[in-house]
Image (cartoon, rainbow, N blue to C red):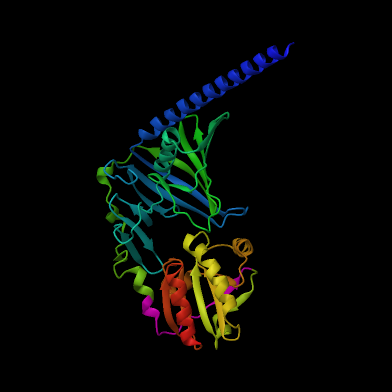
Amino acid sequence: MTKIEKTVKLIIFFLILIIVISCKTNSSNDYLQKVLNSLERIESATYSVQRESWLHGDTIPFTVDCIFVKEYNNPADTTIGASYACFDCDVPTKFQWGYDGKIKAVTYPETKVIVVDNFTARPVPYRPLTPPFFNYTKNIIQYALTTKDSITLNLIEFKEYYYFKLVINEDKQVEFFGKAYYMPESPYIPETTSIYEIWISKSNNLPYKYRREMYNNISVQAISNVELNKLSIADFNIYDYFPVDYEIQKYGENGRENKELNLIGRKAPVWVLNDKDEQRVSLSEFKGRILLLQLTGIGCGACQASIPFLKEIKEKYSEDKFELIAIETWKRKSHSLQYYSEKNGLNYNLLIGTDDVVKDYQTGGLAPVFFILDREQVIRKVFIGYDEERTKKEIIESIDELL
């Protein structure tokens, strides 16, 4: 065989390969469009959702729970195009949170408070919502079919289901609050690849499970006991689900965000908690020293962003005069705290919080919240949230005043 003949055969081989790949891509897109059409026919749905979350690189989930969801297609809502209400799986009448297209409502049983957010208090380009399952998977598939971003698609057929994988190779992480949003760049997120996986049943061409993977965490949702198009959005009123004995507060208007200030000037609520190694640690051990107490949450972006500052401030002051303690209040497990501490190289103690700590310190699960205690363990300052420049400056000034 001559060199020219070999070259011709090689060219023909690659042309055939390109045609095969093109046919496969078209076939995949055709099926995904079929799935999208099925999703768009859903006007309402009820289902149970099993949810799990991991720290990236860990193997054991730090949260496992179940919720019952009522989901409605809502064309009047230009944000995500859906409304929903979420309940306790064991008590399907126990409302936890929801969204009606105008407000998001979240219950805090430990304080019997419902915080209502009408999205006017925060200058963000999107509404910070976790969309319901069918709406979420619909927007992911729609994005995959229409985007001009750098993506990789895979659709693999199995006996009873299809497995779909979307890898987004952009310079920012992509989250879905209805449409795709490109999250702000952060030095604490060096890897920006976003991965979405969806499992689709062949029986009805509808998703039943998805997995979302980002640099900071991984989450999985799987639904069961699904009923479609049995409810009408005309009958949906989120206020009907509010417990009658709960106080309603508006987000950002002298509500939950400012309630912590009531603790200033009071003795800090006492606690005895386990650290990541299951050793008991008591607040009383730190009497006589200035204490910076952070109520934090694994998986909280602002909490993650505060770590370099906390490590710095731990080294800044003498141990006989100052101590720093973080309390994890998002109900994590000791294994997750160990992994989180090792991954981030924490040089300060991280304790496992309880519902009583959340209640006593009045955070309602909000994180991060910083408390500065004097030598007699009286709360002198409270800082809510974390801003790299402002929070750092204010905390250091407050500590210096007390030393």
Q: Residue at x 45, y 75 (%)?
A: 393
Farthest residue, direction left: 234
Q: Is residue 266 magenta?
A: yes
Q: Which residues are magenta?
A: 261-276
* Number of numbered markers: 0
Residue 2 occupies quadrant: top right
x and y percent of residue 273 in the render?
Answer: 57, 74
Q: Is residue 4 left or right of residue 212?
A: right
Q: Which quadrant, please, contains the N terminus?
A: top right
x and y percent of residue 259 in the render?
Answer: 35, 73
Answer yes or no: is residue 204 visible.
no
Of 396 and 226, the residue lying toward us: 396
Farthest residue, direction right: 1
x and y percent of residue 385 in the render?
Answer: 43, 67
Q: Does 19 appear above or below 213?
A: above
Q: Does 69 appear above or below 309?
A: above
Q: Is residue 264 magenta?
A: yes
x and y percent of residue 160 in the render?
Answer: 55, 30
Q: Residue at x 27, y 52 (%)?
A: 102
Q: Does 223 appear above or below 253?
A: above
Answer yes or no: is residue 52 visible.
yes
Q: Does 224 appear above or below 310?
A: above
Of 72 and 243, the residue lying toward us: 72
Of 1 and 79, the residue lying toward us: 1
